[in-house]
Amino acid sequence: MMFKVEDFQNYGKEQFENAVASATTVQNGLSAIATAYGDYSKKSYEDTKSFVEKLSGVKSLDKALEAQSEYAKTAYETFVADSQKIAGLYGDLAKQVFKPLESMVAKYAPQAQ
């Protein structure tokens, strides 16, 4: 079996292109994840600020407990929703990163007969 220089060059070029595509995918995915974390942090800060402002104007214990209960419920719902969103972004990133490997394995794996 003879190997040609062109075969090695094409293989190297293909691997380089896969590496660049994978790096770009990782960069975009991590950017989306960082943005989601930033959005959650900003929303959490604004909700907390609103809660403190509301709490500072409360005159009775009943109203303070009501405000605290409302804040806790909202904070929990926001946390769960954003956590699921971020987990989905991590899952999407993992799928995208391994996609080039799947095609490469399929290309070089022996075919089942």
Image (tube, grey):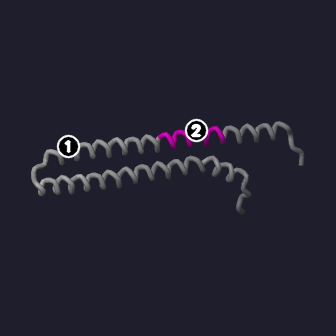
- On residue 24, the disc is 2
Mark 2 touching mark 1, by CB under 8 A? Answer: no
**Residue found farthest to the left:** 60
Quarter of the view holding residue 42: top left
Dot 2: few (<14), some (14–19), or many (≥20) neighbours within 10 Å?
Answer: few
Q: Residue at x 22, y 46 (%)?
A: 52
Where is residue 86? Give x, y as percent. Answer: 43, 49
Nearer-N-terminus badge (2/1): 2
User: Which segment did they paint magenta?
Assistant: 19-31
Q: Residue at x 49, y 50 (%)?
A: 90
Q: Nearer the viewer, mark 2 or mark 1?
A: 1
Q: Quadrant of the C terminus?
A: bottom right
Position of 25 with respect to 58 (left or right) is: right
**Residue found farthest to the bottom:** 113
Where is residue 29? Give x, y as percent. Answer: 51, 43
Q: Residue at x 12, y 54 (%)?
A: 63
Dot 1: few (<14), some (14–19), or many (≥20) neighbours within 10 Å?
Answer: few
Where is residue 47? Give x, y as percent. Answer: 27, 45
- How far apart, in angstroms, are the residues tagged by discs 2 and 1? 43 Å
Q: Residue at x 37, y 41 (%)?
A: 39
